[in-house]
Image (tube, rainbow, N blue to C red):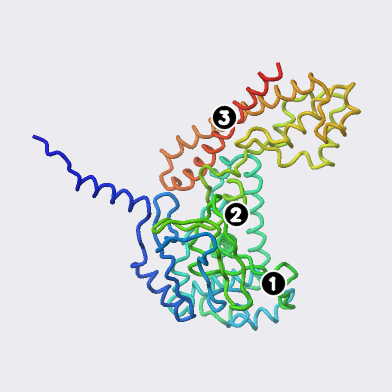
Amino acid sequence: MKKTRGRTGRKRRRKHLQSFMDGVNCSHKLEYIKLKKWLKDRGFECSNLRPAEFWDTGRGLMATKPLQAGDLMISLPEKCLLTTGTVLSSYLGEYIMKWKPPISPLIALCTFLIAEKHAGEKSLWKPYLDVLPKAYTCPVCLEHDIVNLLPQPLRKKAQEQKMTVHELYMSSKAFFSSLQPLFAENTGTIFNYSALEWAWCTINTRTIYMKHSQRECFSLEPDVYALAPYLDLLNHSPNVQVKAAFNEQTRSYEVWTNSHCKKYEEVFICYGPHDNQRLLLEYGFIAMDNPHSSVYVSSDTLLKYFPPLDKQRNAKLSILKDHGFLENLTFGWDGPSWRLLTALKLLSLGADEFTCWRRTLLGDVISARNEQQTLNITAKICNFLIEETQHVLLQISQLKKKKEDLKKHLALVEALRLEDLKILQKSAAIVCNLNVATT
């Protein structure tokens, strides 16, 4: 006879499930023990937060006690921050100061990260470097086949990102070569493209905003970066609010929470009201059920549903371009954006209505026919994007079976596309209801 599970067993299972949901404490791991000791030597101790592994966000920080709105979450002393000041006071300083034309603050930080990583055990920053990601999932790191699965507007930005990093590498090679006296090994081997890509991603995804005064040894690009050990383990959530800034009195970078957090829950910060395409482009992840998420409509998709023989077509396009209505046209959780509907209304103006284009941009109703045509075309565009998204999801599903090594990157793009599909399906229902209401 099968033994029934009693109250003790149920309690144990609930406790096990809760600990899984809360996250698994990682503070006992050697790399975090070394990091906390290294930070303590620089004047930082934190009893509010500890490293943990969470089932949905991966590595993050867990609250060791309840946090209330207005509480100071973390205060990281200036000594712990890695800035261009750190770089200039290092062995790289004299090389940077005499190099002409001046390098950018970004390249200075990239160079320092690569050099310190190469130094290994000799690096004073080794405890921090050891907890940095070994690889990233920003578009610049994705293979060509993966980039092609991204939505068209994001795909274009991803290609631009790849080009930016490549140009940065090519333009910095001469400076890297000038550092040869510092290294026994050839600088071409140390400062290779993959090393720069890793360093660029580290800075792009993990730095906090911290404005520094302009220095003559750097180019005129803004010097606003600071790497913040331990603090950078905090993950993003679009549903929290924090106040973060450098405190001139305490000489520390402080983060104050405006949200509540229970004991053993993950503590989040907010990088800003970014949609998932922006999060993937800049940080290499997406946030599920992101209230800021949108599906972008490219101008090519927009024009697919308008007759090329429309005599006013070019004039309409010129008006839309001049007034910034060919960009940021989106479907969101609440349906088509006002900008998208306005662009479609202007393109739907009849020959006898064209003189009313200014009123269209102000949101006026021009005619029942114009309103109806706009909704019909909106529905067609939405359905086209649904079909396109479903086709890409099928491609991803097939690729996951064939390319085991790309599973992580494919899963990321799949999650983005699934979120897009949910938004588009919700938008389609909203447009359908609007159509019913106007007929």
The residue identified by callout 1 is 103
Identify the residue at the far top of this view.
Answer: 439
Q: Which comes before the other along the chain, label 2 or label 1? A: 1
Q: Residue at x 78, y 28 (%)?
A: 345
Q: Residue at x 46, y 76 (%)?
A: 39
Classify 403 as above or below 51. above
Classify 439 as above or below 23. above
Q: Secondary structure at mark 1?
A: loop
User: Where residue 282 is drawn, which disc sits there?
Assistant: 2
Q: CA distance from mark 1 to mark 3?
A: 48 Å
What kind of residue is marked 3?
Answer: Gln
Q: Are marks 1 and 3 in contact (CB under 8 Å)?
A: no
Q: Which comes before the other along the chain, label 3 or label 2? A: 2
The residue identified by callout 3 is 425
Q: Which comes before the other along the chain, label 1 or label 3? A: 1
Tell me the quarter of the image containing the N terminus.
Answer: top left
Q: CA distance from mark 3 to mark 2?
A: 26 Å
Q: Nearer the viewer, mark 2 or mark 1?
A: 2
Q: Closest to the observer: 343 or 314?
A: 343
Q: CA distance from mark 2 to mark 1?
A: 23 Å
